[in-house]
Amino acid sequence: MTEIKTVYEHIRSNDIKTWILVALFPLIFIALIFLFTWCVAPINQAIETTATVGIPTIILCLAWLGISWFFGDSMMLNMAGAHQIQPDTAENKEIYRLVENVALAAGLPVPRVYIIDDNSMNAFATGRSPKDASVALTRGIIKRLDKTELQGVIAHEMAHIGNRDIRLDMMLITGVGVTVFLGDILMQHIRWGGAVSSSNDDNDNKNMGAILIMVWLAFMVFNALIVPILRMAVSRNREYGADATGAYITRNPHALASALKKISTDARVEKLDSAKSMAVMCIENPMEKRAFLGELFSTHPATEKRIKRLETMSLK
């Protein structure tokens, strides 16, 4: 017999998993710098190099995060081609009232509502906090889902807002961008002679060149392998958490399960094809899916797993 977990158990379990995964980002980054440097330098020099590289990287990540804090949400809405709607127009009154009712049930401020002119079915939430959050819905999801299914989708996005997932997503996207940028800068430095000694007899210079190359390799392994795996794992856990919280808000997990079945058949948003980082924000991956390595590099859990969890969920 399938074990039925309460919504609180789902939320608590996913919160613990998420923060463990987030903590792994800086820990693995620092460990990679140290281990790669230790391959070509004494342990004391490896520790010194790790501190020299790690501390400025973390500071730069925090600085860039501060910039994204003020402009990140508007940038994401612009990338999606979303436009804000007002409650005083007949065309938008019903959808706005639906968002308003779900926000009230969730105990959250009513977010700004945006529409994406795309006939596919998708949605996302963004913003710094519940007080200035936004929910964006495609035209297709509004037209093609029934009222209870649409409530389930909106509740899922309100759950992301209430759980502060939108803030977490912004932090992860920003941090990854900084490490990629620094890796490129280091590669340019090496390419233009920063890792090559002008004298074959200068052991110190040769050693420094080897250290630079190993630091760059650590950046590459982190950006190309570790980051995608951890970021997607965080995203998948937050989707499970938002499903559970959204089901609790509407008291109807089966409606969200039904909505996910429909959304999975046509979730691609063409406007987001060139904005891969936005995939983690959406209720379903808005880009064409690839079978390579399956769920390991997927931004979302398999729809079948999400549906199964919802259909076996107890709201007691």
Image (cartoon, rainbow, N blue to C red):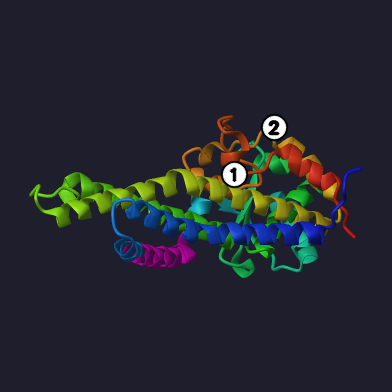
216 or 270, which lies in front? 216
Report the side of 158 relative to 129 (left or right).
right
Split into 4 quadrants, where in the image is the C terminus? Answer: bottom right
Nearer the observer: mark 2 or 1; the answer is: 1
Residues shaded magenta: 51-71
120 or 163, which lies in front? 163
Percent position of residue 196, x then y:
16, 47
Q: Residue 141 falls in which quadrant of the image?
A: top right
Q: Residue 53 falls in which quadrant of the image?
A: bottom left
* Element class at badge 2: loop
Around disc 1, counting alpha carbons within 10 Å, would you say few (fewer than 14), some (14 to 19), or many (20 or more)? many
Residue at screen point 31% across, 49% down: 214
Residue 63 colored magenta? yes
Considering every residue shown, the one lying at the far front of the view is 42
Can you tell which mark lies on residue 3? none
Percent position of residue 302, x then y:
69, 39
Q: How many marks?
A: 2
Q: Is residue 264 visible?
A: yes
Dominant secondary structure of the residues highlighted in magenta in the image: helix
Can you tell which mark lies on residue 299? 1
Split into 4 quadrants, where in the image is the N terminus? Answer: top right
Relative vertical location of residue 44 with respect to residue 299 in this rendering, above or below: below
Residue 75 colored magenta? no
206 or 99, which lies in front? 206
Residue at screen point 74% across, 51% down: 243
Percent position of residue 144, x then y:
74, 38
Hey, what amino acid is under mark 2? Answer: Thr
Q: Is residue 165 visible?
A: no
Residue at screen point 53% across, 58% down: 24
Q: Which residue is mark 2?
A: 265
Relative vertical location of residue 44 with respect to residue 280 in this rendering, above or below: below
